[in-house]
Image: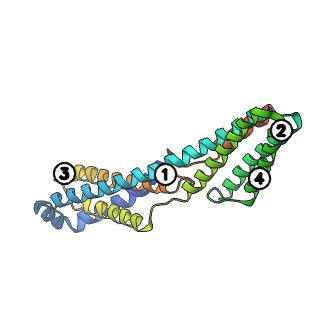
Amino acid sequence: MLTILRRTFYFLVPFSVVFWFIHEKFESTISRSTQNGLAGFYSTDGIIFGLIVAFVIQREWEIWTNLSESVRREIDAVREMWKWSSYAETSVCEEAHKHLEKYLILIVLEWHKGGETRRTENVDAELNSLRGMLVKMTTSMGHLSQQPLNAFENLVSARNQRLNFSKEHMPIILKRIVYFADILLILLSLFIAVNNISLDYIFTASIGLLAFTLLLVIDDLDNPFRPGTWHLTTEGYEKLLEELTLTS
């Protein structure tokens, strides 16, 4: 909430200064532009901008949803492996739990180091250790070994999806188009006026703030791991690690 308020403040202060300056220096130009039908052209620009933004947000939200879902699936898969490994022999169970705890610890550490979008040798090595444990579980658990095998398959699949979706970003040319359209919409709104200066400021600031907020939404969705209005964190991994540590 504080992030949104701070960003809004950073927008409204310079916007208000520009609004005052334009109305002081170009009042006659604003009046002529409004009388000559600029508002109709501005409405068309707003519709085009809305269509572009709607397309971009829909696509970015789809990537965000897939990414957050892959994180949840990865956490659930680790939990399932932990539970099913408890049916193995004591030594095998303890070793499996140790590797699962280390896997979660490595994920959290790599994430905090900025390695959440790439494969690392440490995590891959831990997955290989878990593969070795699955071989031992097959001997120890008999027909029940299929359950941890399925959980491990889900774990690897979810991790791969998380890494793949985390690397998807808006094409740079599309991002520039959206930024340009947003700035253009905000600037043009300053030349659409109503007779009452207070109402003029309220309506103009509302248009500018809406366009600016949409830009923030797109930017946050395109950078899911960067601290912002909302972003993905290691909270789920850390909670699971705490839960598993208490039960071990």
Of pointers 1 and 3, the one earlier in the residue sequence = 1
Camera sees residue 205: yes
- Disc 2/disc 3 C-alpha distance (Å): 82 Å
**Secondary element at tag 4:** helix
Is residue 246 something that shows in the picture? no
> Spatial distance from mark 4 to mark 1, Cα to Cα?
29 Å
Residue visible at 72% across and 53% down in the picture: 109
> Disc 1 or disc 3, which is closer to the eye?
1
Comparing 183 with 92, the one in front is 92
Q: Residues within 10 Å of mark 2 (few under 14, many from 20)?
A: few
12 to the left or right of 94 = left
Please, what is the three-letter code of the amino acid marked with disc 2? Thr
Mark before the other along the chain sequence, 4 or 3:
4
Q: Amino acid at mark 3?
A: Asn
The residue wearing badge 1 is 63
Quadrant location of residue 79?
top right
Tag 4 residue: 128
Q: Amino acid at mark 1?
A: Ile
Of the numbered discs 4 and 1, the one sitting upstream in the chain is: 1
Residue 139 bears which disc, if any?
2
Along the viewing direction, whichever of 9 and 129 lies nearer the viewer: 129
Residue that label 3 marks: 196
